[in-house]
Amino acid sequence: PAAVMIAALAATLVRIDRYPIVRVIIAVGVLAATALVASSAWYLMRPYLNRRSAWRAAIIAAVVAVLSWLDVTPVRIFLVSAAIGAFIGMPESPDEAPADS
């Protein structure tokens, strides 16, 4: 049932895409979706962007930017990012540091 609805929606969208108001509505929808994704990404990334782990986030972001520029597929970018994150590791928090006796 969902596939039929999506096919019907896609067919309808192709037919009404020639009208300027429809293009404006689609552009506003894309802008709203982009804003929602960006705000969600910021909410998820914010705890990792502190002084202790800023260099780690910067390295991974730089690698992702370079790989995106080189047209690497997203799955490979995720795999490389995960490997870098696992290799670098998380910095120790002050609460977890071993106590000297």
Image: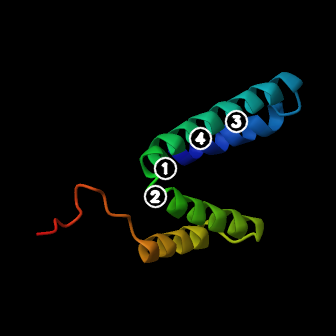
Label drawn at residue 49: 1
The residues tagged by marks 1 and 3 sit, at their Cα atoms, a distance apart of 27 Å
Indicate which disc, 4 or 2, sits on the residue closer to the N terminus: 4
- Left or right of residue 28, residue 97 in this image: left
Residue density around tag 1, few if under 14, some if 14–19, many if 20 or more, within 10 Å = some
What amino acid is at disc 2? Ser
Query: In this figure, which residue is indicated by the disc labeled 4?
Result: 38
What amino acid is at disc 4? Ala
What amino acid is at disc 1? Leu
Q: Secondary structure at mark 3?
A: helix
Residue furthest left in the image:
101
Indicate which disc, 3 or 4, sits on the residue closer to the N terminus: 3
The residues tagged by marks 1 and 2 sit, at their Cα atoms, a distance apart of 6 Å
Q: Secondary structure at mark 4?
A: helix
Image location of residue 59, percent across then percent down: 58, 65
Query: In this figure, which residue is indicated by the disc labeled 2?
Result: 53
Q: Is disc 1 in contact with disc 2, using a CB cutoff of under 8 Å?
A: yes
Image location of residue 85, percent across then percent down: 46, 69
